[in-house]
């Protein structure tokens, strides 16, 4: 990849979502300028320069860009910040991997479902927002068309629950629009599928099997590569490429969330960005490619990467096995964390990111959103047996306790998978 030492990068948002951007930019020799309306923040605390300027204050940001001779603009996975980045780059004449038109076509769930239908990308069966459903239609899932982080989403099993869920989704929707889909019960399994696009060529980078919490909506653990990688590549991959070529998407990254249902895979939503799940930590460890690094490179140079970088992409992870283990918490206030110093030294751990600290409180409103997570641990090993050995060691060593000394980490889903696995 092109030498970036000496380049200057403006990063929108001073909180946790931008930390990995600052860290990676520093690793690449890039000087960082972080903006945000708060004095401090996890990203601001490690940046070279900071500014008390909001991401929507484009006139002030353009002035900062000119005065400091900044080469590009970047942000983390927060959707508000990405929308501001797209607009700012357009106004400042700087490279950006997405346009406002592409964002609107893919991030509004209604627009995205219509686009998928046009190009034959299978979507989850849905129902009219106004119709009264029969008992045989349930369960269904209700969500805002413009939501993220699982906010405003509910699973309903009768019309009484559906009425409450519609209200909840509408309150979470800025556009005041919602979608109702069939809820596919398959043991809590979903897929995450990530693409890298370089000069109009599409590369499926990674596909994983995500298992959600028992009776929950957020991910407990994801395994890579997916057991359905072949099925997806043979049935859906070419349609996805045609769909994104139709909106002129030539460089950048995006990911899908999908549901397996027997021999079918239903795509149900996407992100026109690198994911908060940081799968680039896994692909870099297993194959050598890092899509966040590619996005930084594009922001600073207008080019994603060299041909040699593309050649390292392998959705089968060169035969390795990987997992992203989430640490969801029950409601309560964190009084003690055990094992934080042990986890990074466990064989195969390539990343441990924690979002909470002692004194933080998980409230009932945080359940089934990403705010429920204490952290995420990523592991890459050479075999499934080795992978589960490392995961079990993590399970045995980390603990998050509330003020009464009770365990806050929810291990049910992991324990069920671990106990049913065969080595």
Image (cartoon, rainbow, N blue to C red):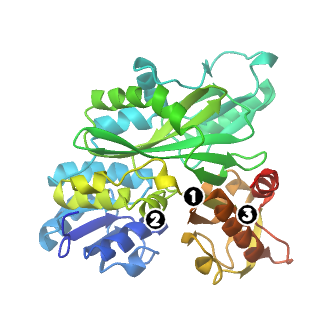
Between the C-alphas of marks 3 and 2, the distance is 28 Å
Q: Is residue 215 left or right of residue 278?
A: right
Does dot 3 land on a helix, a strand or a loop?
Answer: loop
- Crowding around mark 2 (Cα neighbors within 10 Å: few <14, some 14 to 19, many 20+) is many
Quadrant for the N terminus, please: bottom left
Residue depth check, mark 3 versus mark 2: number of the one nearer the observer: 2
Rendering quarter of residue 200:
top left
Q: Residues within 10 Å of mark 1 (few under 14, many from 20)?
A: many
Residue position marked by numbered label 3 in the rendering: 329
Q: Secondary structure at mark 2?
A: helix
Front-lying residue, 264 or 335? 264
Q: Which circle marks residue 285 in the picture?
A: 2
Q: Is residue 330 above or below residue 369?
A: below
Among the two numbered marks 3 and 2 on one chain, the one whose residue lies closer to the N terminus: 2
* Residue 15 in sight in this render: yes
Residue 320 is situated, as x and y percent measured from the top left of the image, at 53, 57
Residue carrying label 1: 322
Which residue is drawn at the image coordinates 32% and 39% (left, top)?
Answer: 202
The answer to which of 252 and 99 lies nearer the viewer is 252
**Residue contact at pointers 3 and 2, CB within 8 angstroms:** no
Label 1 close to label 3 by CB (< 8 Å): no
- Residue depth check, mark 1 versus mark 3: number of the one nearer the observer: 1
**Mark 2 and mark 1 residues within 8 Å of each other at the beta carbon:** yes
Q: Does residue 302 lie above or below 113 as drawn?
A: below
Residue at 41 percent of width and 24 percent of height: 115
Q: Name the one closer to the observer, 199 or 115.
A: 199
Tag 1 secondary structure = strand
Mark closest to the chain's N terminus, 1 or 3: 1
Of 311 and 95, nearer the camera is 311
């Amino acid at each position: 990849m092109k030498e970036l030492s000496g380049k200057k990068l403006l990063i929108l948002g001073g909180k946790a979502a931008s930390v990995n951007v600052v860290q990676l930019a520093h690793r690449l020799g890039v000087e960082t300028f972080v903006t945000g309306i708060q004095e401090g923040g996890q990203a601001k605390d490690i940046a070279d320069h900071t500014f008390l300027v909001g991401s929507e204050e484009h006139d002030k940001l353009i002035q900062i860009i000119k005065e400091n001779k900044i080469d590009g603009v970047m942000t983390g996975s927060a959707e508000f910040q990405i929308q501001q980045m797209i607009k700012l780059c357009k106004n400042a004449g700087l490279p950006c991997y997405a346009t406002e038109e592409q964002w609107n076509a893919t991030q509004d769930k209604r627009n995205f479902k219509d686009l998928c239908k046009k190009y034959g990308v299978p979507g989850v069966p849905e129902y009219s927002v106004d119709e009264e459903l029969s008992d045989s239609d349930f369960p269904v899932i209700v969500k805002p068309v413009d939501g993220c982080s699982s906010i405003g989403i509910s699973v309903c099993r009768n019309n009484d629950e559906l009425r409450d869920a519609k209200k909840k989704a509408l309150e979470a929707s800025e556009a005041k629009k919602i979608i109702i889909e069939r809820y596919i019960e398959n043991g809590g399994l979903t897929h995450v599928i990530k693409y890298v696009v370089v000069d109009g060529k599409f590369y499926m980078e990674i596909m994983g099997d995500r298992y959600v919490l028992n009776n929950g909506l957020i991910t407990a653990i994801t395994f890579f590569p997916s057991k359905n990688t072949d099925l997806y590549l043979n049935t859906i991959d070419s349609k996805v490429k045609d769909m994104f070529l139709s909106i002129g998407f030539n460089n950048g990254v995006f990911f899908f969330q999908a549901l397996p249902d027997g021999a079918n895979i239903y795509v149900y939503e996407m992100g026109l960005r690198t994911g908060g799940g940081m799968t680039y930590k896994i692909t870099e460890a297993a194959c050598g490619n890092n899509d966040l690094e590619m996005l930084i490179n594009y922001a600073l140079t207008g080019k994603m990467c060299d041909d040699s970088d593309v050649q390292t992409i392998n959705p089968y992870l060169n035969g390795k096995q990987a997992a992203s283990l989430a640490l969801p918490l029950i409601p309560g206030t964190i009084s003690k964390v055990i094992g934080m110093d042990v986890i990074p030294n466990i064989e195969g751990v390539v990343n441990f990111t924690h979002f909470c600290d002692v004194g933080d409180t998980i409230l009932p409103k945080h359940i089934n959103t990403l705010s429920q997570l204490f952290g995420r641990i990523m592991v890459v090993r050479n075999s499934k047996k080795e992978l589960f050995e490392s995961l079990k060691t993590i399970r045995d060593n980390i603990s998050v306790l509330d003020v009464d000394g009770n365990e806050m980490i929810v291990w049910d889903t992991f324990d069920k998978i671990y106990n049913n696995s065969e080595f």
